[in-house]
């Protein structure tokens, strides 16, 4: 009688199957998130309490205000006594444009440098109202976009490269294991070089930004540092997972919510506000202010970028200090557990 030795059945590993299922489910989820983040704000682009000036005597502007208020929730009306005051408000970035009541009919003041899309929208809205009265509308571009970039597409396109540069620098510092002062110097130096190269390309070569060269380089550098410091800082605290967290926030929210191609007030709420709290949106707004408006209304976005940079660099130093304390405590613990000879 022969006995056949039974071959033990090995259990099929479940981990690869679980990872496969998770990956299959994750890809469409990320695709849906990306489509929502990028497509939804663009599909809902419209003026929402967009600051617009009305200038002239009260008796002459009353009808203009009444017509503009027919666009419910579209415009936030600011009143000015004359055209000069309205021009000053546009140059200070208080309003995006102004309608001036003149004996010849309404005159529209715009600032295509603040956003060509917004300037075009104002022209259409005011021209449509004036057409009903049979009056032509004279349009004056108070702060014009540069001739090399009349549609503002080059400036809005700069948001993504700066974000990518910041993500790459922060990820490199994290993956290379740079810590403490070394990491801070590396991040700061890399951002400074990005700012110089960016200004050389956008200002000196392409001519799409026309402000003070060094101020523009500083904005580009600070925008990059805000992202890279956040990546390296969170990486120093929680490890490589920090790279993914910041990348998700910057790419899926910061970039599409920046309002760089239109204006923050053209995006659905609270998307426009959230976008200005993140480095891409704050960086685009600050670059417009420095490049075309002599730094007007630059304080808010500058502080936003500075806080991101300072908190990120602080997290880098904190993570380094915590890591040093952990490593210093390990030999002590091992000595405490060593047998007494």
Image (tube, helix red, strand yellow):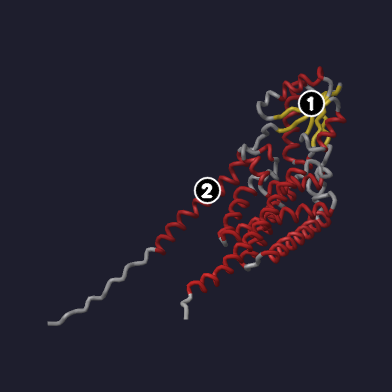
Callout 1 crowding tier (Cα within 10 Å): few <14, some 14–19, many ≥20: some
Give the image location of residue 117, x and y in percent: 72, 40
**Residue 128 seen from this side:** yes
- Residue located 75% across and 23% down the image: 65
Q: Is residue 78 above or below residue 16?
A: above
Write down the residue under mark 2: 32
Helix, strand or loop under label 2:
helix
Q: Are marks 1 and 2 in contact (CB under 8 Å)?
A: no
Give the image location of residue 42, x and y in percent: 63, 42
Callout 2 crowding tier (Cα within 10 Å): few <14, some 14–19, many ≥20: few
- Per the model, the C-alpha gap separating discs 1 and 2 is 44 Å
Of circles 1 and 2, the one toward us is 1
The label on residue 98 is none
How many discs mark residues in the rendered view? 2
What quarter of the picture does the N terminus occupy? bottom left
Write down the residue under mark 1: 79
Q: Is residue 207 above or below residue 270?
A: below
Give the image location of residue 105, x and y in percent: 83, 23
Comparing 185 with 248, the one in front is 185
Comparing 68 with 174, the one in front is 174
Residue lying farthest to the left in this orientation: 1
Precedes in sequence: disc 1 or disc 2: 2
| Image quadrant in which you'd find residue 12 | bottom left
| Image quadrant in which you'd find residue 2 | bottom left
Helix, strand or loop under label 1:
strand
| Image quadrant in which you'd find residue 52 | top right
Give the image location of residue 160, x and y in percent: 67, 53
Left or right of 30 on screen, residue 65:
right
Comparing 117 with 171, the one in front is 171
Residue lying farthest to the front in this orientation: 341
**Residue 243 seen from this side:** no
- Residue located 75% across and 28% down the image: 126
């Amino acid at each position: 009688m022969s006995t056949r030795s039974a071959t033990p059945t090995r259990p099929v590993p479940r981990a690869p199957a679980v990872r496969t299922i998770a990956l299959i489910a994750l890809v469409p989820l990320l695709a849906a998130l990306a489509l929502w983040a990028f497509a939804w704000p663009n599909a809902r682009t419209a003026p929402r309490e967009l600051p617009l000036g009305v200038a002239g005597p009260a008796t002459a502007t009353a009808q203009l205000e009444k017509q503009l208020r027919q666009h419910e929730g579209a415009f936030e009306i600011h009143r000015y006594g004359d055209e000069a005051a309205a021009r000053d408000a546009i140059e200070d970035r208080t309003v995006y444009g102004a309608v001036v009541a003149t004996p010849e009919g309404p005159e529209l003041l715009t600032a295509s440098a603040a956003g060509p899309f917004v300037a075009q929208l104002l022209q259409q809205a005011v021209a449509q109202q004036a057409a009903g009265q049979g009056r032509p509308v004279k349009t004056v571009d108070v702060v014009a976009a540069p001739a090399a970039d009349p549609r503002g597409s080059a400036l809005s396109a700069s948001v993504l490269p700066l974000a990518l540069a910041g993500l790459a620098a922060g990820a490199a510092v994290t993956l290379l294991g740079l810590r403490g002062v070394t990491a801070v110097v590396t991040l700061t130096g890399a951002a400074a070089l990005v700012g110089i190269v960016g200004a050389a390309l956008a200002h000196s070569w392409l001519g799409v930004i026309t402000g003070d060269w060094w101020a523009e380089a500083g904005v580009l550098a600070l925008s990059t540092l805000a992202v890279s410091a956040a990546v390296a800082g969170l990486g120093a605290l929680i490890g490589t997972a920090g790279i993914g967290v910041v990348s998700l926030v910057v790419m899926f929210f910061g970039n599409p919510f920046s309002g760089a191609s239109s204006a923050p007030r053209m995006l659905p709420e609270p998307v426009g506000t959230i976008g200005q709290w993140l480095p891409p949106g704050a960086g685009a707004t600050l670059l417009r202010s420095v490049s075309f408006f002599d730094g007007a209304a630059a304080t808010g976005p500058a502080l936003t970028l500075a806080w991101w940079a300072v908190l990120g660099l602080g997290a880098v130093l904190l993570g380094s200090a915590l890591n040093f304390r952990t490593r210093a405590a390990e030999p002590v613990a091992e000595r405490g557990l060593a047998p007494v000879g």
